[in-house]
Image (cartoon, grey):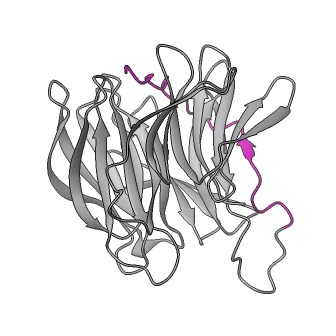
Amino acid sequence: MIGEGAVWDDRAQVLWWVDISAGLIHRYDPVTRENTAQEFGEPVGCLAVREAGGLVLATKSGFWLYDPDSGRRDHISDPEAHLPDNRFNDGATDAQGRFWAGSMKDGGAPQPMGRFYCLDADRIVHPWKSGIYTTNGLAFSPDGQTMYFSDSNARVRTVWACDYDTATGTPGPARVFFDTRNVAGRPDGGTVDSEGCYWMAGVSGWQVYRISPEGEILLTIDMPVEKPTKPMFGGKDLDILFVTSIGADLTEGTDQPQAGGLFAITGLGATGLPQKRFAG
């Protein structure tokens, strides 16, 4: 189980998340506590809810439109068809409804073969920064004018921020936002709350962090699992922090019966932002 890609659907009041390696798309209803899963048939890295209905996915074979009700799927583009060892990993939508997603080498020795891509509302794919080991951490500030991204690899383990042109969807030069060598966990998925603070899953560190817009740690949450992967605020008041996790390749001798599960954290005194729907 590689739980990832949590996204809150504020209209349906459900949480979408994925099991990357199994190619499963999960739908969790926190009111009924019912979780259902659909098999897509290949690794699914991340998703977003579409304004027109259904989902947009970034998978092993690129970008897809997917209707979970009918099962209909429409392939948009595979920008890395020439890189058969790669798959998509983390993603997020900007304030204008563009879908950003990053790729990575899947399995074997890590190599900096990953790249970030932007899928516009016109369904044109635009490549951006390359040379990334494990693309992660995509999120946007409340005003949409700052973009966050990270590389989870142990040699890099850095979160960057850059100014973001909301009119064109163009990121500016990257600057170091947070160097995770100061904490136990490496950077995995991220989200931003209503106060502009960045929440980072500290994979392999048993922790989740709240980081101020200035890059200072405001809160550390200890988790019962070694590899939390993606935080996302949800619930009717956007005050529940959902966190996905990995249940594979855990440290030998550790007791983690809940590894790979989905967690809900309440009482944080923080609220999230509604996730913009993909406009395409």
Q: Nearer the viewer, residue 280 or 276?
A: 280
On-image quarter of the C terminus: top left
- Determine whether, in the image, residue 89 is placed left or right of residue 252: left
Q: Position of residue 115 (x, y in %)?
A: 30, 58
- Determine whether, in the image, residue 248 is placed left or right of residue 195: right
Q: Is residue 168 visible?
A: yes
Please tell me which residue is depicted at 82% across the width and 23% down the height of the picture.
31
Q: Is residue 28 above or below residue 130?
A: above
Which span of residues is magenta-colored? 257-280
Q: Is residue 3 above or below residue 142?
A: below
Q: Position of residue 137 (x, y in %)?
A: 42, 52
Please tell me which residue is depicted at 21% across the width and 50% down the height of the picture.
128
Q: Main secondary structure of the magenta part?
A: loop
Q: Is residue 34 magenta?
A: no
Please tell me which residue is depicted at 29% across the width and 46% down the height of the picture.
117
On-image quarter of the N terminus: bottom right
Q: Position of residue 63 (x, y in %)?
A: 43, 40
Q: Position of residue 136 (x, y in %)?
A: 42, 56
Q: Is residue 272 magenta?
A: yes
**Residue 202 occupies quadrant:** bottom right
